[in-house]
Image (cartoon, rainbow, N blue to C red):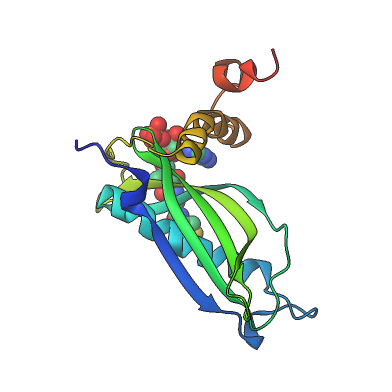
């Protein structure tokens, strides 16, 4: 299968925060942001694999910064690493200042998607080669994250999670 780069899957969703999408503090509701990230990640996974893709897990979400009503929010998704049938998608969330237009990082998240056939059975995805320093760092750490996710889901024995164990040795 053709070797691809993270940039080829890059997906950018920019949208406003409307009143119906906020919590009582007038900040973006967490579930709304999760949905936007899921959509962007799904498109990135589809661009990489050219297959039907499903969310297998949400490995990490950090709501570091509240996103106020009226903000312009940009969700950027890229495939950070592929395995056999699964893809790790890294998401960066930015808000932009109205006057200066400067972007500030608000949140980040990591999702895992699996490519499937028409019957929902997992199918192989193309390999990926990171290009930039950030892409290489994310690629390198992805195996640890996959092992942690599988251990927590009860799909891998902790003793088999070699990359993860190496962190504590
Ligand atoms: C995701 C799904 C296809 C995995 O099916 P499965 O029977 O577990 O298949 P496998 O065991 O072969 O796993 C397929 C891949 O997913 C990975 N995977 C499964 N669960 C995972 C998890 N919790 N975290 C990370 N990766 C996971 C496996 O490691 C494997 O990756 P690889 O082939 O790249 O090594 C299946 O669980 C599914 O269809 N789930 C529902 C998806 C869905 O509807 N999502 C929307 C939620 S509303």
User: Which picture quadrant has residue 70?
Assistant: bottom right
Q: Is residue 160 visible?
A: yes
Left or right of residue 52: residue 151: right
In the picture, the quarter occupied by the C terminus is: top right
Q: Please determine whether, in this image, residue 30 is positioned above or below residue 53.
A: below
Ligand 1's image quarter is top left
Q: Residue furthest left?
A: 1
Q: Residue at x 55, y 56 (%)?
A: 92
Q: Residue at x 73, y 68 (%)?
A: 66
Left or right of residue 142: residue 83: left
In the picture, the quarter occupied by the N terminus is: top left
Residue 17 is situated, as x and y percent measured from the top left of the image, at: 61, 80
Query: In front: 100, or 104?
Result: 100
Q: Residue at x 31, y 48 (%)?
A: 116
Q: Is residue 120 visible?
A: no
Residue 51 is situated, as x and y percent measured from the top left of the image, at: 26, 52
Residue 52 is situated, as x and y percent measured from the top left of the image, at: 30, 55
Left or right of residue 103: residue 81: left
Q: Residue at x 60, y 30 (%)?
A: 151
Residue 98 is situated, as x and y percent measured from the top left of the image, at: 62, 80
Q: Residue furthest front?
A: 100
Q: Please determine whether, in this image, residue 147 is positioned above or below residue 46.
A: above
């Amino acid at each position: 299968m053709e070797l691809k780069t993270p940039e080829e899957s890059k997906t950018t969703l920019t949208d406003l925060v409307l009143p119906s999408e906020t919590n009582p503090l007038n900040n973006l509701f967490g579930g709304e942001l999760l949905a936007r990230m899921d959509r962007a990640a799904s498109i990135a996974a589809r661009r990489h694999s050219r297959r039907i893709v499903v969310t297998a897990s949400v490995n990490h979400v950090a709501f570091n910064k509240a996103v106020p009503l009226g903000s312009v929010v940009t969700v950027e998704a890229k495939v950070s690493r592929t395995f056999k049938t699964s893809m790790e998608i890294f998401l960066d969330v930015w808000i932009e200042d109205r006057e200066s237009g400067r972007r500030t990082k608000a949140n980040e998240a990591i999702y895992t998607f699996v490519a499937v056939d028409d019957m929902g059975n997992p199918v192989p995805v193309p390999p990926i080669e990171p290009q930039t320093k950030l892409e290489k760092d994310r690629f390198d750490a992805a195996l640890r994250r996959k092992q942690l996710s599988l251990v927590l889901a009860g799909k891998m024995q902790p003793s088999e999670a070699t990359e993860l164990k190496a962190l504590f040795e």
